[in-house]
Image (tube, rainbow, N blue to C red):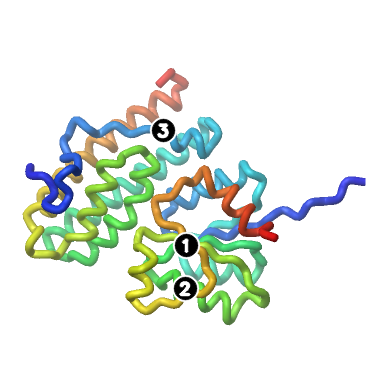
Amino acid sequence: MKAKTKITHVLIIDDDEFLLYAIRKKLELAHYKVTISSNVHDALFKLNMIKPDLIMLDVIMPDLNGVELMHIINSQILEQETPIILMSFLPKTELYKMGYNLGSALYLDKPFDINGLPGLIKNIIFKP
Amino acid sequence: MEKHPEEKTAPILNEDSNLFSLEQLNRIGNNDKNFIIKMLEKFLVSVSECTDTIAPALSQNDWSKIKIAAHKSMPSYSIMGLTELAKDLAYIEKYAGNKEYHREVFELINLIEKKNKKLIQDIKNYLKALTQGDEV
């Protein structure tokens, strides 16, 4: 009997709906389960109901900075460490200068090649 | 219009270089026509929001608002193959509010506004042809 493979669930949080839909389409075509959120409140609400395997998080958002949201998610919501990819036009060095602790989050400079995301996520989730 | 002061090789915005490309979107969506239609509709909203935010903010010297709007617009312009516009938005985000670059930023914003109007019309025409099943 063929073993059932667990589908990887990705939560994407970004106030740019164009980007949200583009990433969702690419990941769904690659057989990922995708949940999207265009604001922090919606993301926090959804995080009470789902346990994503990976979170993609925009840094610059209107209601709360993505790095701050990441710390809330890690310390108050998720019981186990979940890989987080931060996305921003701001260089990583700029965020360090602003005093942000990025922890173990991965960092993607915008604009990035959306077509490369399925492979990148696979490498993160299934790293040895 | 003069070239960007710090980017002498940067392309100058002109109203003829307004062509969008669906190459990236087709790769992302595996040539799904319905996805393209949905994304073009979303892009129209993004372009309108960009214009509707930046132009009034400029008249109020609200540089913070201009920077945020420029920042937010860049990814979608990039995906639509509008790399020159995305580059100019990045320039606006970086230099808006800096007195030294005020004239360049002001001119770029006015040009982007004009280009956005044409872009909206071009995409509406494209969408019309696409939804009517024409080869476009």
Q: Residue at x 33, y 33 (%)?
A: B124
Marks 1,3: beta carbons within 8 A: no
Crowd band around label 1 with a 10 angstrom C-alpha radius: few (<14), some (14–19), many (20+): some
Q: Amino acid at mark 1?
A: Tyr
Are marks 1 and 2 in one subunit? yes
- Name the spot of residue B107 as percent of width and height, x first: 10, 49
Residue labelled with disc 2: A102
Q: Find the residue positioned furthest to the top.
A: B135
Marks 1,2: beta carbons within 8 A: yes
Q: Amino acid at mark 2?
A: Leu
Residue labelled with disc 3: B22
Q: Which mark is residue A107?
A: 1
Position of the C terminus of chain B by quadrant: top left
Circle 2 — which element? loop
B25 left or right, relative to B86: right
Crowd band around label 3 with a 10 angstrom C-alpha radius: few (<14), some (14–19), many (20+): some
Q: CA distance from mark 2 to mark 3?
A: 34 Å
Q: Residue at x 47, y 64 (%)?
A: A86
Residue A68, image quadrant: bottom left
B87 left or right, relative to B106: right
Circle 3 — which element? loop
Q: Find the residue positioned furthest to the right.
A: A1
Q: Along the polypeptide, which appears first: circle 1 or circle 2?
A: 2
Circle 1 — which element? strand
Residue closer to the observer: B56 or B114: B114
Task: Give the vertical position of B126 relative to B66 (above or below).
Answer: above
- Marked residue chain, label 3: B
- Name the spot of residue A60 as percent of width and height, x first: 38, 65
Crowd band around label 2 with a 10 angstrom C-alpha radius: few (<14), some (14–19), many (20+): some
Give the foreground label among 2 and 3. 2
Q: CA distance from mark 1 to mark 3?
A: 27 Å
Are marks 1 and 3 in one subunit? no
